[in-house]
């Protein structure tokens, strides 16, 4: 018998791999974006389509639309990677690079400590204290640097979810990372529905009802996920909503905290609310360089904070699980440090450096705010489409009215209605959106998610006009 010869063409079949991975879904890079990639390949080979280009509205990836990185941040990153060329850079850049290298003790090509560079964790601690206006700072050993927020979220789910009866309460609509990793961990999703008509708010009644329903089904609610500002829904939760949260372990996804556009809203961290109220929930807060004003998705930087004392052995297990990845990438760590510690006069920077940095950040924020308004206005001017105000984050999540005829047509093709709608939109306009069903939604409703990141504004306006024209013409067929 030849043990080296397989009876099949391939050694490993789908049935042979972890079935929880097979069951996990991630709509942001699902069927519609995959179809768009195939179309792009065909366009590259000269095949003609009814549009000139693919416009990737499916993912919050700022620099794909030409968003410029913050110049001071990139100059520091460039210089720290090329120490021999440090003298070519501005004196303020040199100072920051030397500060980092002296604190680290070696170059960024080496692994860091498992939790990440202490100098960056100290900067994060200072940032959190200033942001939340608290008397105390987080202990830097309660802070962990990660490859984006997603890595921290994944590590914590893998650490905390231990039984098939464990449940995680997630907002619906939700960011698909949560449902995917919960599935991989063989745990239960416990949905709590955001109230769309009141601006995607959290209600205490929804939380309590779904908590009790899970218990009645033999599911043990362990963790509550709160995304603020909301993804995909774009709402900014007020303090009262945050005070109503149940006494569970809380995952506070706060990666869009700099993206608050509504004049009557401001970001409040769950950490601050619970400290002000002297509550002792175990809170794991996540932040990232991918969003906000920094927009450095590809450099993969972020952090997790553990709020409230936790069992020392549990903390050691978290550290062990993080150590399996050795350390977060070092440039992502430096970028995280730059995000939370901009150049200041106090550190010795020139007024010009400080003013340039502030001006870049201000202009980018105002541009995002304007684009959020453009998208909201055009969607709400489109017949059969309704979009709640984009108060924050980087997305719109409009409701689309689909006729029974269209829904039956989609089902006859074996497709979810809003998925078929999104594919038709792609095939006719080149606009790539994510079907609302990929984020989960109330039964009987249909949505899609699109980013507000298109720039310049003229291209955004043209894209919105294209969408409006296509949608209204297409819906007339049904």
Image: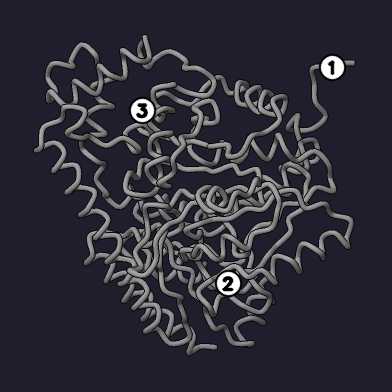
Is 51 placed left or right of 478 in the picture? left
Q: Residue at x 54, y 71 (%)?
A: 200
Q: Which residue is mark 1?
A: 3
- Please give the label number shown on residue 418: 2
Comparing 122 with 201, the one in front is 122
Task: Tell me: 45 left or right of 421.
Answer: left
Q: Residue at x 40, y 81 (%)?
A: 380
Q: Earlier in the sequence, mark 2 or mark 3?
A: 3
| Badge 1 density bin: few <14, some 14–19, many ≥20, Cα 10 Å | few
Decide if residue 320 is on the left or right side of residue 260. right
Q: Write down the quadrant of residue 402 in the picture.
A: bottom right
User: Could you give the CA–CA distance between mark 2 and mark 3, rounded to whole angstroms?
Assistant: 41 Å
Quadrant, the C terminus:
bottom right
Q: Tell me the element at label 1.
A: loop
- At mark 2, the secondary structure is helix
Other residues around mark 2 within 10 Å, as few (<14) / some (14–19) / many (≥20): many
Question: Where is residue 398 shown, x and y percent of the image?
Answer: 48, 74
Residue mark closest to the camera, 1 vs 2: 2
Q: x and y percent of residue 31 in the render?
A: 57, 57
Disc 2 + disc 3, Cβ < 8 Å: no
Tell which tag, 1 or 3, sits nearer the viewer: 3
Q: Which residue is mark 3?
A: 334
Residue at 12 percent across and 25 percent down: it is: 90
SS class of the residue under badge 3? helix
- Mark 3 neighbour class, 10 Å CA radius: few under 14, some 14 to 19, many 20 or more: many
């Amino acid at each position: 018998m030849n043990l080296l010869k397989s009876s099949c063409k391939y050694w490993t079949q789908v049935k042979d791999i972890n079935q929880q991975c097979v069951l996990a879904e991630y709509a942001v890079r699902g069927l519609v974006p995959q179809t768009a990639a195939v179309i792009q390949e065909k366009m590259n080979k000269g095949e003609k389509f009814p549009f000139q280009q693919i416009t990737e509205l499916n993912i919050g990836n700022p620099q794909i639309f030409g968003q410029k990185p913050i110049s001071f941040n990139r100059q520091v990153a460039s210089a720290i990677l090329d120490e021999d060329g440090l003298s070519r850079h501005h004196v303020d850049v040199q100072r920051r690079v030397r500060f980092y290298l002296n604190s680290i003790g070696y170059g960024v090509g080496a692994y860091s400590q498992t939790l990440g560079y202490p100098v960056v964790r100290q900067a994060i601690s200072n940032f959190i204290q200033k942001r939340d206006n608290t008397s105390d700072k987080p202990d830097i050993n309660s802070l962990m640097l990660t490859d984006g927020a997603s890595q921290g979220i994944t590590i914590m789910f893998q650490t905390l979810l231990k039984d098939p009866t464990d449940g995680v309460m997630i907002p619906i609509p939700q960011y698909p990372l949560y449902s995917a990793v919960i599935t991989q961990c063989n745990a239960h999703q416990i949905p709590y529905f955001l109230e769309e008509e009141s601006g995607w708010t959290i209600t205490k009644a929804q939380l309590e009802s779904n908590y009790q329903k899970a218990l009645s089904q033999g599911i043990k609610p362990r963790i509550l996920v709160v995304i603020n500002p909301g993804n995909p829904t774009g709402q900014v939760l007020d303090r009262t909503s945050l005070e109503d949260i149940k006494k569970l372990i809380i995952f506070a996804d706060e990666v869009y905290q700099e993206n608050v556009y509504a004049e009557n809203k401001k970001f409040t961290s769950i950490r601050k609310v619970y400290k002000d109220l002297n509550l002792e929930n175990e809170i794991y807060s996540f932040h990232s360089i991918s969003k906000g004003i920094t927009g450095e998705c590809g450099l993969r930087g972020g952090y997790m904070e553990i709020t409230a004392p936790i069992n020392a052995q549990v903390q050691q297990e978290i550290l062990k699980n993080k150590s399996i990845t050795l350390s977060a990438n070092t440039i992502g760590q430096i970028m995280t440090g730059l995000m939370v510690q901009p150049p200041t006069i106090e550190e010795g920077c020139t007024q010009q450096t400080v003013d340039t940095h502030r001006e870049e950040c201000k202009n980018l924020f105002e541009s995002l705010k304007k684009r959020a308004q453009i998208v909201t206005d055009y969607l709400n001017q489109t017949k059969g489409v309704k979009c709640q105000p984009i108060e924050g984050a980087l997305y719109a999540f409009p409701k689309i009215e689909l006729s029974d005829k269209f829904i039956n047509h989609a089902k006859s093709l074996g497709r979810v209605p809003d998925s078929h709608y999104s594919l038709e939109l792609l095939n006719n306009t080149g606009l790539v959106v994510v079907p609302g069903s990929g984020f989960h939604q109330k039964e009987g409703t249909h949505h899609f998610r699109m980013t507000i990141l298109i720039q310049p504004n003229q291209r955004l306006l043209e894209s919105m006009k294209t969408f409006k024209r296509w949608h209204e013409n297409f819906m007339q067929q049904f």
